[in-house]
Amino acid sequence: MAHETPAGGKGLLDSLTTLAATLVAIARTRLELLSTDLEEERAHWLTLLVSALVAVFFLGMGAVLAAFFLVVVFWDTHRLLVLGLLTAGFLAVGAAAVAFAMHRARTRPKPFAASLAELRKDRQHLGSRS
């Protein structure tokens, strides 16, 4: 049963209790969102790392075997030309991969963007009530 004031409204203690419960609920929701963001980041980086390692291994093996095959094919006629072209090709692909990785690192969305946006909304909402 709520304590009523002579004017018929709730008492100060009830209002403070409701406010505290609301603040705790908001904090809990924001912590759950932050936890979800952290889990998504961890899963993203783990998937990216495993995919990159698998890709590097198999592409590297394929490139070495292809280079070896081409050198053997042209051993008697143009082996130095083939080795030079393969070296230039590998360096070009490596440089392009580095440029792509740097681009991706610079343009990646800001971590915890959803959590920060919700906290900004909470702050604005609480500021507008004052």
Image (cartoon, rainbow, N blue to C red):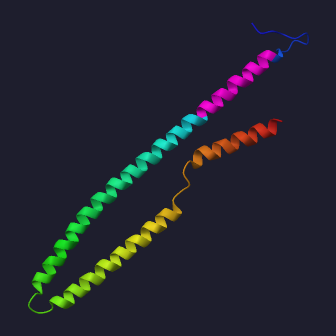
Q: Is residue 13 left or right of residue 101?
A: right
Within the magenta stretch, is there residue 27?
Answer: yes
Q: Quadrant of residue 66?
A: bottom left
Magenta part of the protein: which range? Answer: 13-29
Q: Is residue 32 left or right of residue 75?
A: right
What quarter of the picture does the N terminus occupy?
A: top right
Number of numbered labels in the structure image? 0
- The residue that appears at 74% across and 24% down in the rendered structure is 19
Name the spot of residue 71 as percent of width and height, x first.
14, 83
Within the magenta stretch, is there residue 117?
Answer: no
Compared to residue 93, the image places residue 130 above or below, namely: above
The residue lying toward the viewer, choosing from 117 and 42, is 42
- The residue that appears at 13% across and 77% down in the rendered structure is 69
Residue that lies at the very extreme toward the left in this rendered image: 76
- The residue that appears at 25% across and 86% down in the rendered structure is 85
Chief SS of the magenta region: helix
Q: Quadrant of residue 128?
A: top right
Q: Is residue 62 left or right of residue 129?
A: left
What quarter of the picture does the C terminus occupy?
A: top right
Residue that lies at the very extreme toward the top in this rendered image: 1
The residue lying toward the viewer, choosing from 123 and 9, is 123
Name the spot of residue 33 as percent of width and height, x first.
55, 38
Compared to residue 29, the image places residue 60 above or below, namely: below
Name the spot of residue 113 as percent of width and height, x first.
58, 49
